[in-house]
Image: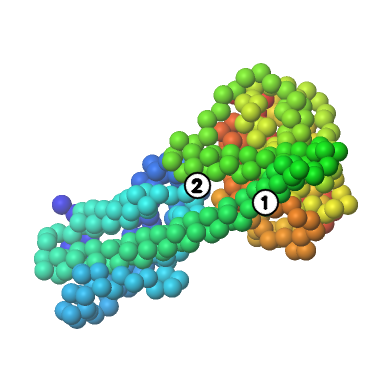
Amino acid sequence: MPPPGVDQTMKLSRFITTHMEQILEEWEAFAKEIPTTSKMSISDLRDHAKQMLQACAADLDTWQSAAEQASKSKGEEAVPKAGTAAIRHGLGRLESGYSVAELISEFRALRASVLRLWQSQVGQVTEATTDDMVRFNETIDQALAESATAYSQKATHTREIFLAILGHDLRGPLATMAMAGDYLTHPDADLARAGAMGARVKTSAALMTSMVRDLLEYSRTQLGSGIPVVRRRADMRDIGQAALDDASAANPRCRFELEVAGQTAGSFDAARMQQVLTNLLNNAAQYRTQSEPVTLRIEGSPDAVLVQVGNHGEVIPRESLASLFDPLVRLARDGQEDEQPNINLGLGLFIAREITVAHGGSIVAASDEDAGTVFSVRIPREA
């Protein structure tokens, strides 16, 4: 029985607006059980749920003809309207790494939370309450259709851009290797230049290896398996030097500098951490000014090792810093001064973050005129 004093014929729209916080708390508890949301803040979890519920309540209070209800029940009005909370929710969940199944489960939980809480306060089922339930289900279905359609369209568009970038970025090193092969197999080839040609082939191979490796790691994260790490005794100084060697091979025109201080040994996955630093160094080399070096600073403290990769170049706007670690995001380069392709498909920083998090560490970016752009990675010395 409902508690005394509760309106026995409470309309569902009124219940939603007056019990908004209770509904959001129950839905939030469900959302936290989804693995993707484990590190999200409460505000991120709630992002558009309140706005969608308010839209549902407004729809319930809007008169609807029999023809309009029949059209909605058939999904004929499920064409997304630009800018709705449901559309923004779908796009946001795509950026957060949600799967379509996880997106749908959120709407299922939201529907169940509202109806369960409301029915506990409704004295009896009447024609009015049944109509409210039908209208509410139609409204939730409409929001789900908008959200899922926006998610699908954006995912398809992103995939197309991804393939276009891959084709563009692979074309450069492939062309270099093809030209080197043609030259070296020519009967009149100058063997004295064979070493220079070999170096160009080596650079192109390093670029392609970096792209393929990032693709494989990105695919692993999208399959839900994450990036595994196996920690063993290692020295971050040695890892940093190996990463510098990799980055130098991929960016022969860039000058790199290494600075080390303190105790840098600990328990790390050396191969994975080398991948982190190589990706950061490659990224810094792409966006540097030609006159300044890319710096790699490694500093040990009692409980952690701090690694910083810095370069001087265009300042990254504050509003862009948060999206740097998202997959398939790359900043535009103005006045590209050499023929070096953008080699990481926007995946390098994403993978660097995933490996850092798998180590229990953190990675942040800062950018200003004086210090330049600096990526700081903090890795606990022990697991």
Quarter assignment of residue 265: top right
Name the residue furthest top.
233
> In this figure, which residue is indicated by the disc labeled 2?
40
Q: Give the crowd class for mark 1: few <14, some 14-19, many >=20 residues within 10 Å.
A: few
Which callout, 1 or 2, points to the residue nearer the camera?
A: 1
**Looking at the image, which is closer to me, 128 or 187?**
187
Quarter assignment of residue 242: top right
> In this figure, which residue is indicated by the disc labeled 1?
175
* Count of numbered badges drawn on the protein: 2
Q: x, y percentage for residue 182?
A: 71, 46
Pick whichever of labels 1 and 2 is earlier in the sequence: 2
- Whether residue 173 can be seen here: no
Residue name at image x 88 percent, y 52 percent = 291
- Say whether residue 191 is left or right of residue 179: right
**Looking at the image, which is closer to me, 306 or 336?**
336
Q: x, y percentage for residue 319?
A: 65, 60
Instruction: Give amino acid for label 1.
Output: Ala
Residue name at image x 27 percent, y 78 percent = 62
Identify the element where label 1 is drawn: helix
Q: x, y percentage for residue 68?
A: 22, 78
Q: Give the crowd class for mark 2: few <14, some 14-19, many >=20 residues within 10 Å.
A: few
Cα distance in 3D space between marks 1 and 2: 44 Å
Colouring method of the image = rainbow
- Whether residue 227 can be seen here: yes
Residue name at image x 33 percent, y 61 percent = 144
- Say whether residue 88 is left or right of residue 357: left
Determine whether 209 is above or below 339 in the image.
above
Name the residue furthest front.
187
- Say whether residue 61 is left or right of residue 34: left
Q: Mark on residue 24?
A: none
Identify the element where label 2 is drawn: loop
